[in-house]
Amino acid sequence: MHRCPVKSSRSTTPKLYMLLLLVKIRISFCIHNLSRRIYWPVLSLTMARP
């Protein structure tokens, strides 16, 4: 009775880890793109000002 859930959890753990890693990478990329999109106009505005 107890062995089946353990086996299933063990087999799904790497899949969950990979999914979490992919989500983390995607979030980091989104944050990077957003920061770049926000950062460059702000930088150009600050540089344009005397």
Image (spheres, grey):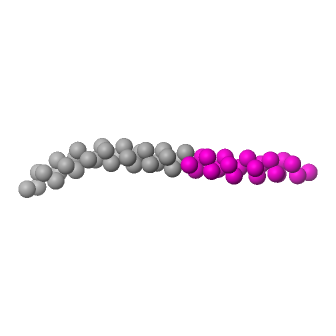
Main SS of the magenta part reads: helix
Q: Residue at x 61, y 46 (%)?
A: 33
Is 28 magenta? The answer is no
- Where on the picture, by quarter, is residue 11? top left
Image quadrant holding the N terminus, namely bottom left
Q: Residue at x 76, y 52 (%)?
A: 42
> Which residues make up the magenta segment?
30-50
Residue 31, percent from left and from top: 58, 50
Closer to us: 14 or 34: 34
Is 36 magenta? The answer is yes
Q: Is residue 5 above or below residue 11?
A: below
Residue 46, percent from left and from top: 82, 51
Say whether residue 35 is left or right of residue 3.
right
Say whether residue 12 is left or right of residue 38.
left
Say whether residue 27 is left or right of residue 37.
left
Q: Residue at x 11, y 55 (%)?
A: 2
